[in-house]
Amino acid sequence: MYPSRFQYEAPTSLSEAIALLSAHDDAKVLAGGQSLIPMMKLRFAAPAVIVDINNIPKLDQHGVHADGSYRIGALVRHAALEKSTTLGEHQPLLASAAPLVADPIVRTRGTFVGSVCHADPQGDWASCMVALDGSILAQGPNGRRTIGVDEFVAGPFQTVLAPNEIAIQAIIPKPVGTRAGGYLKLERRVGDFATAGAAVGLQMDGDTVVQAGIGLTGVGARTINASEAAAALVGNRLDPDVIGTAAGLAAGVAQPRSDHRGSADYKRHVIETFVSRILTDAARTPEKVA
Amino acid sequence: MSLFEEVPVSIGNDVPRRRVEISLNGERRAAEVEPRLLLAHLIRNGFRLTGTHTGCDTTNCGACTVLFDGAPVKSCTMFAVQADGHEVTTVEGLAQSEQLHPIQEGFKDEHGLQCGFCTPGMMLSAKALLDENPNPTEDEVRWALSGNLCRCTGYQNIVKAVLWAADKMRGPDADTGTAADETGAG
């Protein structure tokens, strides 16, 4: 399958890339291309101009920023996060999700930020961003702005990015406690869309939860922020009652549809089980360390 | 009066071709391509290396896997222009003259293929794994090949083939230090 014809541009600086986006009506940024290129081949997308940002330096870096936040550049591939030896100590949720994104070959090319920008309700990283209260740093002709992920995603496959803005970084805020949590996903086979997935981001003070976020994958028309379930954790220890309450609340806000991957009830059950498992595991981990 | 009249084809939106220079299996090759040409098509139809297969054409099956600067990518999901200045290894780049690569030997020895359609992609994913991890466990092999689909073998012999190759590539003297040996020594 061939995509429609397009004009190809490969700028080597962000300002050049933004100028190209401003100069053309129907231009699209190409990073990893693992969603965009299939969509172009199927002609769901037919941009007139492709602005390939792969030759722009310094976008492939991730790590702790001077302000304590964790930053992930627009060209950080899933594989770079999966293979990182330092990600886990700072971002256990992201480290547990990285090996579950797509398949190993797609992970070589696909990017974290690109996945968030694709805004697929089945996207794993969007749920992690919701659970971690992350935001996107966007750069346009008039400078930079930071957009919280809940606001960033306007709907399925839609974001609030202006046509001449580029998402240059994902930002995970500076933690107020010790980070814990994880990601679980059910898929029929590696690389399939998620039947259901759950991301739980925790910040602990000893064995008390001081901050929490829960994002749900594939069980609604958009990534679901299970904020009430997360709020039920804050100020509490992760004992079985608290875990059961939070898992039940998370399953309650899921809006799954019955399809060939499973019935709505089944998917809701999977969410409850996943949230409960991640929290139970997090409750055990500090003891292991101690 | 005719009900049909042929009109000139309007291609429209005419896009200039771009020059691409890649290191293909260690050899410098150049081509002028339309930007929408996929890397898989450049390799197969342009450079006539038909060992790279196009299976699903929708980023699912991994039959078109090649190594891009040493890492496995689906060549149906990259534009050829993006390979400019990069190294690409296809299945044709595995054997050295008449000498099969140990991974190829392993697939032969362990019957790691039936129809053979997925085999080039499997072997390149295996090569990327063994370059990074010369002594993988069976689980690690299965994990590394999880983006490559096979509809014949049930994967069992493919996994055996990769473990066979890993063993051969480590050589006779490097066979200490595996989990099995440590158990035996203890």
Image: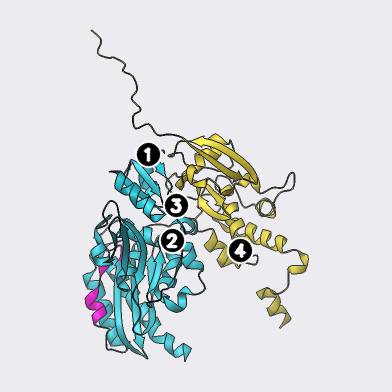
User: Label 2's element?
Assistant: loop
In the rendered image, residue B104, in percent from the top left (x then y), is placed at: 67, 51
Chain label for disc 4: B
Q: Which mark is residue B132?
A: 4
In three-dimensional space, the C-alpha distance between marks 1 and 3, rounded to whole angstroms, equals 19 Å
B167 or A155: nearer the viewer: A155
Residue at which label 3 appears:
A12
How many numbered marks appear?
A: 4
Callout 2 and callout 4 share a chain: no
Residue at which label 2 appears:
A59
What's drawn in magenta, residue-wise? Answer: A217-231
For the residues carrying marks 1 and 3, which lies nearer the camera in this image? 3
Mark 2 touches mark 4? (CB < 8 Å): no
Q: Which mark is residue A200?
A: none
Looking at numbered disc 1 in the image, what kind of residue is underneath it? Answer: Phe
Judge whether residue A8 is colored magenta: no
Chain label for disc 2: A
In three-dimensional space, the C-alpha distance between marks 1 and 2, rounded to whole angstroms, equals 24 Å
Q: Residues within 10 Å of mark 3 (few under 14, many from 20)?
A: some
Q: Is residue A224 left or right of residue B22?
A: left
